[in-house]
Image (spheres, grey):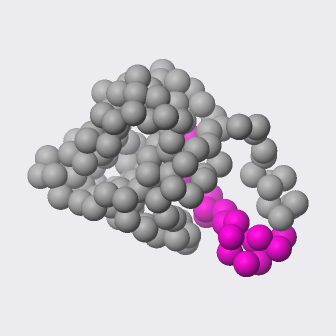
Amino acid sequence: MAFVATAEACDSNAALLASGDLRALQPIFKNYGQSRAFSGLIVTLRVFEDNVMVRELLETKGEGRVLVIDGGGSMRCALVGGNLGQLAQNMGWAGILVNGCIRDVDEINGCDIGVRALASHPMKSNKKGIGEKHVPVHIAGTLIREAQLIS
């Protein structure tokens, strides 16, 4: 897949922006990981302060996809840490977008994937396995659906 700058995509597709077929997330995310730009088909997950399902999805073959996690914007614990970042890299995920926090920033920055998150937080999440996989999520003012392309 050829890389297209987000600004270029927006400039060249005014009609798609107007129709809502092309959307841009609000610029609230910080960059982590070695891949500063990444894209792929989306896999969605909605959890709150619990990362059991994050691990379950990252244990599957990524095949260049991007895991989009709606963590409710929680700033009280991390949903992804260094071990999950390494797992995502090893399983072939292109990236992870977290509407919440990560931890182990130095470890994640050493992984050859892209990660976007609101912030870092040292506390780990709960381990109850509560959440919803493959559902539409609202993040940064945008509705995101399973199997859409994110870039």
Question: Residue 112 vs residue 22: left or right?
Answer: left
- Asked whether residue 47 is in view, the answer is yes
Task: Give the residue displayed 73% in from the left and 78% down from the top.
Answer: 19
Question: Where residue 85 sits: x, y (%)?
Answer: 39, 31
Task: Farthest residue to the right: give it.
Answer: 12
Residue at image position (16%, 52%) is 129
Image quadrant in which you'd find residue 13? bottom right
Residue at 77% x, 77% y: name it. 18
Q: Is residue 26 magenta?
A: yes
For residue 71, say whether it is visible. no
In percent of width and height, residue 29 lies at 54, 52
Residue sitting nearer the eye, 43 or 130: 43
- Residue furthest to the bottom: 19
* Magenta extent: 14-31
**Quadrant occupied by the N terminus:** top right
Q: Is residue 151 magenta?
A: no
Q: Residue at x 49, y 64 (%)?
A: 145
Q: Along the horizontal axis of the image, is 13 left or right of 90?
A: right
Residue 141, percent from left and from top: 55, 71
In the depicted structure, whether residue 104 falls above or below residue 143 = above
Total numbered labels: 0
State whether residue 116 is above or below residue 48: above
Q: Is residue 128 left or right of 39 when viewed as pictured?
A: left
